[in-house]
Image (spheres, rainbow, N blue to C red):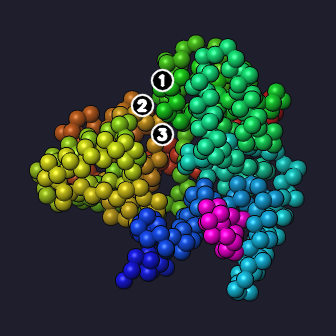
Amino acid sequence: MNSIKRAVDLFNIGSYNKALSLFKEVISTQPSEEKIALYYICLIYRKLKKWSLAKSSSLIYIKKYGFNWKVAEILGDVFHFEGDYKIAKRWYRSALGGQEMSSSDKRRISEKLEVANLEEKQKKHQLKLSLVVVEGTDNFTDDLVERLSQGNLWVRKFVIPRNKAVMLSRTFKLFSSSSIKKMVYEMVGRLSSLRKALKWGDVIWVEWANYLAVVASHIKPKKKKMFIRLHSYEIFTDYPMDIDWRGIDKLIFVAPHIEEIFFERFPGLKEVIRDTEVVFNGLNLNEIPFDDRKPGYDIAWVAHINYKKAPELSLQVIKKLVEKNAEYKLHIAGDFQDPRYDVYMRHLVRYMDLEKNVLFYGWVDDMEEFWRNKNYLLSTSLHEGHPYNIMEAMARGIKPVIHWFRGADELYSRDWLFATVDDAVKIITSGSYDSRKYRDHVIHRGWTLEDQVRSFKDLIYNLINH
């Protein structure tokens, strides 16, 4: 069976991650089959609601291979989600002009067009929220955008293309210590799609306190309200010192310890920043199935593979476990962000004789299948804010085993925290296991999407009313 047929069969049975991997492999090895592979990649990203990836893949498809009514429909769905009803309707109308379309297809797209038109009319008189984020860094916003859009808000997601973001970043680095930087920020900001986002919204939400926030803070219209959400890595950069905090109405942190470290690193900003608030990340528990699990031998490790995540520690843990029982396996879902780690990890796995016990999955877009048979989530990070991988594992009933980064004891039970490899092994082999307790911890701490949406709504309306 050829690769394309195998990938299509996997797609048809809903095995999207395996299908996606095969389609990507086809693109790199069989150029003549690229068109059909890219088409299915667009479909998969749409089904998984990976909106930004669906958008970029679909635009590439249209540019390379011309019009396809199904791809046009996907683009309509993407822009509808992003709150750009005008462009969404344009793509839906385009899709309706396609050939070889069934009557049910036409009816479905016509209904989508009607809904977009109706929503645009309803939203015109509502408060406008601009979410500004760099392409590829919007992983933590889509559930929020979807829920906030269901209320009395018109939310538009403005994704700044990566190439323009890189230009902003380079300009920032070049002129960050220059006396003319204000003028440069204004010039670059006005040339970018950032200007449109700042002009459109009544309230502007800048995701990440990075170079985009620096530029946005310097060119924000005076009458607009703006808040920035800081996740984690930004506190170890110089970006916060270059943000013009005079125009920022609120700074959002994802955990209390991140706020503490922020002001330890930037004590002078205590007198400058107007207001701060902690809003924890939240999960849509309706889409995360709970399983009553038991102790076992399958350990998940889920993250980008880089120095911050300290993946080398996971190999030390699995080695100790395998010495006790050869059935233990470490399942690593993540992409190598530094080729040094790729070389190092694979070398060490061979040297430690762990080739049967450590499995590399690469980046996994569809995590549902990956989580299915796992008993533990091992987190070895040396620093975290409020990580989704731990939360999602717990919500699924999986026992967390967490390296004791600063602030971890404020978020989790100490029974799940380890400082040494022996501690980690003890947590895994103890026999103590309570799936319901792990999910309940997420609920009782208020780490649900409902809690997060409520906090964001209160925040937005309070900004407008003060």
Question: Which kind of residue does numbered mark 1 sit on?
Answer: Ile
**Residue 144 percent across, percent down from the top left:** 63, 50
Work out whether mark 1 precedes mark 2 in sequence or the reverse, and give the earlier one.
1
Q: Determine if residue 462 is in view.
A: no
Mark 1 in CB contact with mark 2 (< 8 angstroms) = yes
Quarter of the figure with the C terminus: top right
Which stretch appears magenta?
A: 58-77
Q: Main secondary structure of the magenta part?
A: helix
Work out whether mark 1 precedes mark 3 in sequence or the reverse, and give the earlier one.
1
Residue 261, numbered label: 1
Above or below — where is 457 with respect to 95?
A: above
Q: Is 183 in front, or is 437?
A: 183
Residue 75 shown in magenta: yes
Label 2: which secondary element: loop
According to the picture, the residue beneath numbered tag 2 turns out to be 407
**Residue 205 percent across, percent down from the top left:** 69, 38
**Position of residue 450 in the picture relative to residue 318 (left or right):** right
**In this view, which residue lies farthest toward the left?**
323
Residue positioned 77% across, 49% down in the render = 153
